[in-house]
Image: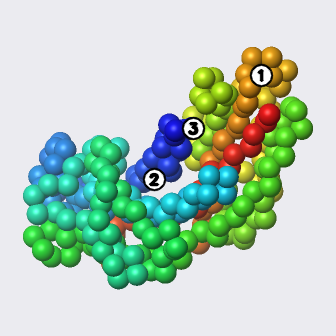
Amino acid sequence: MKNTLFIASVIFLAGCGGGSGDGGSPSLPDPKSEHSKDYDASLLEAYFHANNTKSDTLGLTLNTVSAKLQYKDNTGRHVYLSGSDEIEVLADGVKLQSNQVIDSTLFFTAPASGVGIYEFVWRRDGQVIAQASLGEMPVEFTSTVTYDGDKINYSWPEESDHKYTYIAAGLSCDNNAFTKYYSENENWRDNVISGGSVSFDLAQAFAVTDANLRSTYTTCTVITDLIAEDTNLSPQLSGSNIKVDARFSELSYKTLF
């Protein structure tokens, strides 16, 4: 399927995150395990990420939630759900079923029509360890995209208290016969956009020119994943061992020729 690998990669990247945590209890040793059942609950935190993805070009609306348990002192370690630990996600009171697991992260698909309130729960031995609710998402936008033969230009109306970034810009020609990716920074979270606009120069970003591409390929498209986050997002949390964040992602396509 056209550009499937790019779409899958940016959605996975957008859905994976976490934070440094606030540190586990110094009185308890690090189990150094990949299984959640080996950890005291105080050493772990539940991390939930809600992501709304849209692409007008593809006619795509995809609302997802990713969830995992992570060791507070090393959130990059894979901690797989095991023993009596359970993760539950509800959308407007309806329990969602996990339909995919990547590494130690569970993925849930929410209704494309939108969700009023998300509820997130971590249970152990049937008892609630942590829970949270989220009743708002970042404001969605649709970018205006132009191409002048040298630069691809994106613009959209900015919302107050929102942070805008991009994961990557991908150039794809003749159904992925040629692909190239660009990110200004190694960590996409540092690709901060201000002023409601961003441009990518073909020569600078992809080391090619329009003439080069036209002489070799029949058609070329640039795909960019633009991200909006509400910096004042206020999920209702039950305690310190649960984290929730949310993003809106626009998969923007621009056919160069």
Q: Secondary structure at mark 3?
A: loop
**Cα separation between marks 1 and 2:** 33 Å
Q: Establish if 196 lies above or below 242.
A: above
Instruction: Describe residue 71's horizontal placement relative to residue 185 as left or right.
Output: left
**Mark toward the start of the polypeptide (3 vs 1):** 3
In this view, the residue in front, 141 or 232, is 141
Name the residue rendered at 67%, 28% in the picture.
173
Relative side of 15 to 78, left or right: right
Which badge, 3 or 2, comes first in the chain's sequence?
A: 3
Please tell me which residue is depicted at 34% across the width and 75% down the height of the picture: 90
Do the residues under discs 3 and 1 have CB atoms within 8 angstroms? no
Image location (x, y in percent) of residue 52: 53, 63
Pointer 2 residue: 15
Rounded to the nearest whole Å, what is the CA distance between mark 3 and mark 2?
21 Å
Neighbor class of circle 1 (other Cα within 10 Å; few <14, some 14-19, many 20+) is: some
Tell me which amino acid carries mark 2: Gly
Q: Earlier in the sequence, mark 1 or mark 2?
A: 2
Q: What residue is disc 3 on?
A: 2
Residue lying at the far right of the rendered structure: 148
